[in-house]
Image (cartoon, helix red, strand yellow):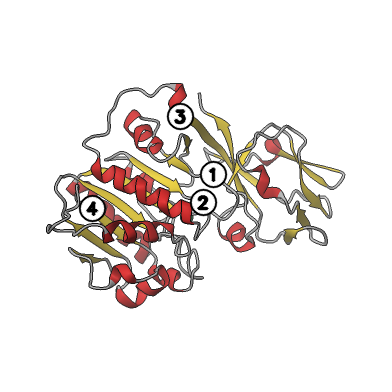
Amino acid sequence: MLNELNQIPRGLLELQSHQLADALQGPTLITLQGMREPALFVSVLLHGNETTGWEAVRRLLQDYTPGGGERPLPRTLVLFIGNVDAARHQLRRMDGQPDYNRTWPGGKADACAETRLMDQVTALMRQRGLFASIDIHNNTGLNPHYACVNVVGNSFLRLATLFSRLVIYFIRPRGVQSLAFAEFCPSVTIECGKVGDEAGIRHTQEFVEACLHLHDLPNDTLSHTQVDLFHTVATVKIPAHIEFGFGEHHLLGLDPRLERFNFSELPAGTHWGDVLGEEMPLVVTSESGEIVTSDFFELQQGRLVNRLPVMPSMLTRDERVIRQDCLCYLMERYT
Ligand SMILES: [Zn+2]
């Protein structure tokens, strides 16, 4: 069930993300009238433990009087607050829930309450028409701040580079919010570093505020000096039956310092970890959905190494995230 509001409930901006479930009846869409239309759409907490989006937005809104008054919003804001149940427990999602950023139109998730909810939000926003869409996330590894686009278009890149010159283009996984909204407005997913990082919150607040003040998103071409654009070529997962951990004494013992590989161009033959037995403990899926594990990785006497030069992102030491999402993505420079 989607809850729709046209104002901020009293006291909501004082709450931390884990307290929102008590104040809101589930996922909530809040439309806050501003001076200009069409609206800017912002989604937060699609992953319940990724709090930077809510922190940034509630700080920003404390500086305004949405709906009019002394400090009206420069542009109408539609705020979607996603998985408040998972946020209560500071989890990406609850066991038994689908991932709230895989259930948007175009995804492969089985029809369920969440896919119907995201269908409804998407239909409402498509009908309304949007200035732009921003979906705010954190990640768990050591990563720079970056923006993701699902369309290589000038207005998309313009929006992305307002946040970071590091931009990643991807079309998988399907069912993510920014991919669904890319059909009708410039949209980005932003990755704002680790949860709770003050610099990430401030950067995000400044970015959303800048977007609210923008008159338009120019559609002219960006030069190579304005953007570092990479694209995801594959996703790396650890199959459910493979026991893994960091360090020794695991079927797959990953290098404890793996996170430092994020956004580094790794030469072929780089050591990722050690493997007991003969079975390749990773599955690599290309952007088109093919299994391409042996193109990217091989075992050399129990050492797991990459066969091609690659640039990983989203590597993390959080084993739950690895199980629920993936080990990492592999990227190449987009030209
Ligand atoms: Zn996320």
Of the image marks 2 and 3, the number of the one nearer the N terminus: 2
At x 68%, y 31%, the residue is 309
Q: Is tag 1's residue or tag 4's residue first in the polypeptide sequence?
A: 4
Q: What residue did someone put label 3 on? A: 227
Task: Write down the residue under mark 1.
Answer: 144
Mark 2 surroundings: few (<14), some (14-19) or many (≥20) residues within 10 A: many
Label 3 CA crowd tier, 10 Å (few <14, some 14–19, many 20+): some
Instruction: Kindly indicate the quadrant of the structure image that contains residue 116.
Output: bottom left
Q: Residue at x 56, y 60 (%)?
A: 324
Q: Residue furthest right?
A: 301
Q: Is residue 211 left or right of residue 161?
A: left
Q: Is residue 257 above or below residue 131?
A: below
Question: Would you say the beta carbon of the disc 4 residue lies within 8 angstroms of ligand 1?
Answer: no
Instruction: State if disc 4 and disc 2 touch (CB < 8 Å).
Output: no
Query: Which of the two labelled residues, at mark 2 and mark 4, occupies the earlier sequence position?
Result: 4
Could you say which quadrant of the image residue 300 lies in? top right
- Gap between marks 1 and 2, in whole Å? 6 Å
Residue tagged 4: 77
Residue at mark 2: 193
Disc 1 from disc 4: Cα separation:
27 Å
Q: Do the residues under discs 1 and 2 have CB atoms within 8 angstroms?
A: yes
Residue at 23% x, 71% y is 9
Whichever of labels 3 and 1 marks the residue nearer the N terminus, that label is 1
Residue at horizontal 14 percent and vertical 48 percent from the top: 35
Mark 3 vs mark 4, CA separation in Å: 27 Å
> Label 2 is placed on what type of residue?
Gly
Depth check: give the residue in front, 255 or 237: 255
Task: Report whether 47 appears left or right of 278.
Answer: left
Can you give x and y, in whole percent of width and height, for residue 327 in the image? 62, 51
- Pinpoint residue 201: horizontal percent, then vertical percent: 43, 54
